[in-house]
Amino acid sequence: MPLVCVVGGGLAGLAAAAALGEAGLDVELFESRGFLGGRATSYPAPGAGEGEPAIDNCQHILLGCCVNLLDFYRRLGVVGKLVFHREFRFVEPGGRVSRMAAARLPAPLHFGPSFLTMRCFDWADRVAIGRAMLAMRRQRSRPGLDRITMAEWLSELKQTPRAIERFWRQVLVSAINEELDRMAASHGFQVFRLGFLSGARWSAMGVPRVPLAELYGEEAWRRLPKVKIRTRMPVESVADGVTLADGQRRQPDAVVLAVPWERAAPLAPHIGLDFTGWEHSPITGIHLWFDRAVTAWPHATLLDRSVHWMFNKSGGRHIQLVASASRGLAAMSRGEVIAQAVRELAEFLPEAGRAKLERAHVVKEMRATFSAVPDLEERRPVTATSDPRLFLAGDWTRSGWPATMEGAVRSGYLAAEAVCRKLGLTARFLKPDVA
Ligand SMILES: Cc1cc2nc3c(=O)[nH]c(=O)nc-3n(C[C@H](O)[C@H](O)[C@H](O)COP(=O)(O)OP(=O)(O)OC[C@H]3O[C@@H](n4cnc5c(N)ncnc54)[C@H](O)[C@@H]3O)c2cc1C
């Protein structure tokens, strides 16, 4: 049986390995770190007590429309470790809550009734948002959406400042991890087409019930015995077969290179990858442990402040906050970030102001995702390379999605399909988008 080497144990590499292994190929996956999951992983919290569960580097969520990610979880037998939520709380400073939940109406009307009652918007905001949603459906195939920013498109549609700040920015900055005036409008369109307008089932929010790394633990890989996982084995080159840092070599029939974009070029200098002008966009995750429960909500989106989401990780005492496109927090010290986060949280959850903060942990992921600016889409590398045995995967490749877990899995499936074609096999792994 042909051997395929996969380099990188993030979601892209894992998805490629799982698909190829299930198709019956021998797969050897090399990951430089001691654990799997790449940017979507978990580890013991600093200062954690005996038996305390690992924490995620940052809360990761998915939507029902992430059909390839869900398919990958199915291969690993871990879909049951996700909880799906169908109600979203938009909370204003001061604590007023607006709920958004799908009604039993056909798409795209399903969010209509709750939208009319959301008190964080007034009538002018609702009318503006409704108009823009209709325009989005009409302009779905409008050429050039990749060449303008989402902010430019919203200004064409004359959105109110509050609609921009509390709706478009709140949803899209978290989904794309970029500001509206830097993000290509095509990405904003995709989020709303698939996640909002296509049907209630596709907008349900999936949250893992277990630390992320448990989703790809040893037990899961026992279902796929053709896949050999090698952790703590950094690869040094894929220019002529695979050369490991410890000097070992492999000459596989095909290689899937699934490392982050800034690492890909040095490992494969012979294929001429060009990332001129590419930039990263950061995400900051803030874990707060209080001496008592500060909320009973499972999660909420927090309006008008630097932090965008809060997740209740354990009985209301361990709260994880997420700030996307968090350039404003980058220059702040750990202490300043924590003080600001607690101050902001107390504006939404008064109990957080009264409770004692026992512990805190800040994760600034400065290279969280690539910055999805206009004119980048066509420059994202495709799977095939000039080396007939080398295929690319990773959330930065041209997967059809922005840098997300779904994008990473799609890229892994596309690479696995290309490997199969090269080896004379017909196999389809990629599931089509829901709309
Ligand atoms: C803080 C944060 C929050 C996020 N939140 C969400 C979210 O809520 N929802 C969502 O969908 N997405 C989210 N994302 C994005 C998502 O995590 C990524 O898009 C996705 O995990 C990328 O997967 P990947 O396999 O392409 O890359 P990576 O996860 O970066 O995997 C690449 C792997 O390659 C390994 N590697 C590198 N060099 C070598 C080498 N020389 N040899 C061997 N191995 C090597 C790395 O160690 C790593 O494990 C978030 C990202 C971050 C950082």
Image: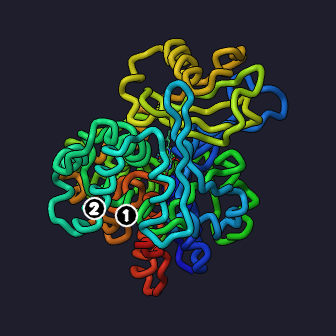
Identify the residue position indicated by label 1 in the image.
193
Question: Visible in this render: residue 49?
Answer: yes
Answer few, some or many: residues within 10 Å of disc 2's Cα (few below 14, many 20 plus, some between 14 and 19). Answer: some
Amino acid at dot 1: Arg
Q: Quadrant of residue 371?
A: top left
Instruction: Name the residue: 43% across, 75% down.
Output: 432
The tag on residue 136 is: 2
The answer to whether marks 2 and 1 mark residues whose Cβ atoms lie closer than 8 Å is yes
Name the residue nearer the viewer: 20 or 290: 290
Instruction: Pinpoint residue 211: horizontal percent, then vertical percent.
Output: 69, 45
Q: Quadrant of the C terminus?
A: bottom left
In the rendered structure, the answer to whether residue 366 lies left or right of residue 71 reads: left
Q: Quadrant of the N terminus?
A: bottom right
Instruction: Pinpoint residue 14: horizontal percent, then vertical percent.
Output: 56, 60
Instruction: Name the residue: 57% across, 24% down.
Output: 345
Q: Secondary structure at mark 2?
A: helix
Up-down: is 208 above or below 90?
below
In the displayed image of the protein, which residue is found farthest to the right?
50
Instruction: Name the residue: 41% across, 81% down.
Output: 421
Q: Secondary structure at mark 1?
A: helix
Q: Quadrant of residue 290?
A: top right
In the displayed image of the protein, which residue is found farthest to the front?
123
